[in-house]
Image (spheres, grey):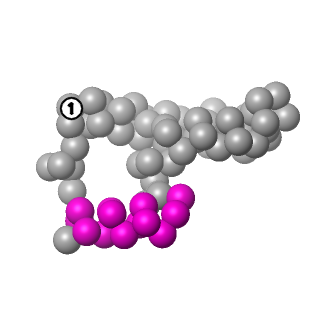
C-alpha cells in the first residue's frame, strides 16, 4: 500500500497519523474546522484539509480522483 509513496509522502502520513491520534485534535478538531470556516472561508479551509489529511483518509473529491486511486491500487 505504501510502496508507491515517496519519502515525503511517507513522512507526511506519519505526522498526520500522529496528529490525528492526539486527544486535542480528536476533541477540538471540529471546533477548529468551524473556526477556520468563519475566519478563512469554506473554500480555503476545505482546500487546506484536502491537501493535508484529506489526501490520506479519502480517495479524493471527485469520481475521477477515486477512479485514479482504484487503478493505482489494482
The residue tagged with tag 1: helix, strand or loop? Answer: helix
- The image quadrant where one finds the C terminus is bottom left
- The residue pinned by badge 1 equals 7
**Residue at position x 29%, y 36% in the image:** 9
Residue 68: image location, x then y, percent = 33, 63
**60 left or right of 1 in image:** right
Crowd tier of the residue under label 1, counting other residues whose Cα lies within 10 Å: few below 14, some 14–19, many 20 or above = few
**24 left or right of 64 in image:** right
- Specify start and end residues of the magenta stretch as a single range: 61-73
- The image quadrant where one finds the N terminus is bottom left
Determine the main secondary structure of the stretch shown in magenta: helix
**Residue at position x 58%, y 36% in the image:** 48
Residue 34: image location, x then y, percent = 79, 40
Residue 49: image location, x then y, percent = 58, 41
Q: Would residue 19 be visible to someone looking at this image?
A: yes
Vertical arrangement, residue 42 with respect to residue 12, above or below: below
Amino acid at each position: 500500500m505504501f510502496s508507491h509513496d515517496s519519502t515525503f509522502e511517507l513522512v507526511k502520513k506519519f505526522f498526520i497519523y500522529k496528529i490525528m491520534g492526539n486527544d486535542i485534535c480528536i476533541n477540538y478538531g471540529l471546533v477548529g474546522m468551524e473556526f477556520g470556516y468563519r475566519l478563512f472561508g469554506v473554500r480555503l479551509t476545505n482546500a487546506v484539509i484536502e491537501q493535508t489529511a484529506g489526501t490520506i483518509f479519502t480517495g479524493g473529491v471527485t469520481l475521477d480522483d477515486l477512479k485514479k486511486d482504484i487503478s493505482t491500487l489494482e
